[in-house]
Image: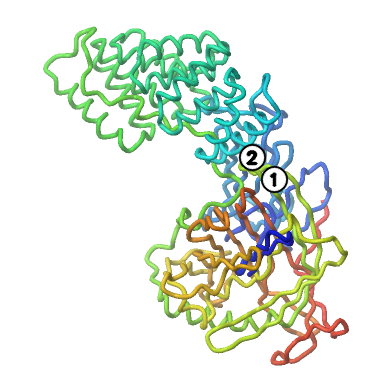
Amino acid sequence: MKLSPTSPFLSVVFVSLLSIRLLGQVAPGVQQMNGMQGDQQISTYETAPNTAVVIVHTFAEEKPVRLDRSARVDLTNLANHVGGFLIVPGHEDAVFVNTVLGKYVISVTAVGYRSESQEITVLSSSRQYVDIVLHRDPAAVTISEASGVMSPKARKETRRAVSLLKSGDLTNAEKRLKAAYVSAPSNADLNFLLGYLYFQKNDYAQAGTYLGTAANLSPHSAQTLTLLGRTRLALQNYPEAQSALEQAILVDSEDWVPHDFLANTYLHQNEYIKARDEAQIAVAKSARYGKNASGAAELTLGQALIGLGQKSEGIHALQVFLNENPPENMIGPVRTLITRVQESDQAPTAGSEITASPSPLMTVPKLVLSMQTWRPPDIDDIKPTLEPGVTCSCAQVLAGAGQRVQELVQDVTRFTADEDLFHKSLDGVGLSNHAETRKYNYAATISSKPGSVLIEDYSEARVPQGGYPDGIKSTGFIMLALVFHPEMQGDFDFDCEGQVKWFGKPTWLVHFRQRPDRPNRMHEYNLAGKAYRIDLKGRAWIPEDTSQIVHIEADIVNPAHEVQLLSEHQVVEYGPVPFARKNTMLWLPKNVEIYFDFRKHRYYRHYAFDHYMLFDVDVSEKVNLPPDTAVSEPTPSTEKRPD
């Protein structure tokens, strides 16, 4: 698989065998999720027979208010616990096509909002609409580009820093913010961003300095005052933490978060009445966000009540805290506190100091902005639910898959197809900077020699368009399955992880990883004529009854800093394609997706293949792809379903 830019200074070649799909990872139980259009803009969707279209509307706080930011919508099949996702702008719907009948859970996440989930049952092939309302997460920090007086250069640096902060790149964000700070040291937003950055780096002294400046410059920012109070609390500077949090409450008395931290501050100063009152306010105001929203406040409340001599009430509050799924590292200390209070000869007297108590600060989640929504998670971050009690013979699975891949190699050279390329440049939270679509005529040839297999694919643009999207050419990704070719298996370590259900069929999951002691013959980037080999790891779905690879995903083993490749995720799907005139069925690639963070830019590519044409030649005959080669058409594999 190759990917090569057309700039004279950059020639990137992905020699990895991958496939791409449109804005969503597809996995077992959800065949194809490549629609992302609002329902009002279109009246028909393409979907396979006996499958449904699921349309998810997402709202902010209440209907019909739409989100002002992109959202990630996951659709997971409850039968096999796998699925796919879409990233959509807030004003658009998430449209999942080719959804097989069954039970699913839909989860929606967006930066600054609490995640919401809903179970649905897809009973028929008609459209199914789902409305989900997201509520703001008051504990989340919202960051945006700095306003106020600032030079164009400083504003540009700040804009880049905000994008880096949202994607978690603190090191480069710090460089950008410091560059902007030189010319705008009195900008409140810039000081807040620096304070947030150093808080994330656990440098609370630095964070306090910048946040203090930001609070002085913008004294009516509840977010700045709350984060400043939290920073002072982490530094155990309780009087200054109290001052900042009390100011935050004056600015926004409805936000439960500063009440929570203020209760904690009072508790550390043995002011138990104030701690109790603020904790009760935090619990009450957080009720709308779910019972687990204010776990730290429940812990503070319990300790404050014990400090006031109200033993039974305090233990009850601590039990409520334990029942709300607290962090693992807090369960033991809280139980120890309960036991210590229960076994004491007498109840603590009012005003007595609570010593050796677990700190409520330990229950506060790490301050985060967003998850990395622009690409699917790394293959090793996903642990599929396996069928219990099923053992796997890795050697047997590899033998069967190897035979099928040998057939695939031959079949790939027997057809041509229409190839649709969708390309997007994305920012760190999945928003599109620009997008374009290209159409090609696709064909491939094969050559082999002992110990190696080489497949070259050809994509001819139907209309001359001048170069490639963003100057990057990608080839060979459809053949990621070559990892399982008998000639290639020795280059990888394989682990048959177990069995799952794929569309109701028992399917093996096989994990693979490039061996460090073997040559890399699968994946490379080519820059300025120099090839850089990139090691892969991944997972394949292989049905037990056919040994055909139906789905395969891969990530790079390590970032390749020499070519500025920070991450890459590939998804390829294969399936049967019938050719009615020849009474032939071939197993061929259908969809490919590639997500890659390359040279300080993030890209997404989706390849889809359609209108397959079979060469009218013997399978053993070498195909030279003459323009007048006779072909036969396949039967349609999808249909367009009217509204």
Quarter location, residue 608: bottom right
> Of helix, strand and loop, which one carries label 1?
strand
Vertical relation: 242 (above or below) 97:
above
Give the spatial CA distance, label 2 vs label 1: 9 Å
Asked if 357 appears above or below 399 in the picture, the reply is: above
Q: Residue 438, how many percent across, how many down?
A: 80, 60
Q: Using a 10 Å C-alpha cutoff, classify the residue at mark 2 as few (fewer than 14 neighbours), some (14 to 19) or many (20 or more).
A: many
* Figure quadrant of residue 442: bottom right
At 57% from the left and 58% from the top, the residue drawn is: 563
Q: Nearer the viewer, mark 2 or mark 1?
A: 2
Contact, CB < 8 Å: mark 2 with mark 1?
A: yes
Q: Position of residue 231 (x, y in %)?
A: 42, 22
- The residue under label 2 is 71
**Which quadrant of the view contains residue 314?**
top left
**Amino acid at circle 1:** Ala
Q: Circle 1 sits on which residue?
A: 94
User: Is 328 placed above or below 455 here?
Assistant: above
Of the image marks 2 and 1, the number of the one nearer the N terminus:
2
Q: Position of residue 59 (x, y in %)?
A: 67, 32
Q: Label 2 sits on what residue type?
A: Ala
Residue at 47 percent across and 53 percent down: it is: 381
The colour scheme of the drawn protein is: rainbow
289 relative position to 92: left or right: left
Considering depth in this image, is 152 or 592 the residue closer to the camera?
152
Give the side of residue 566 with respect to residue 125, left or right: left
Q: Residue furthest left?
A: 345
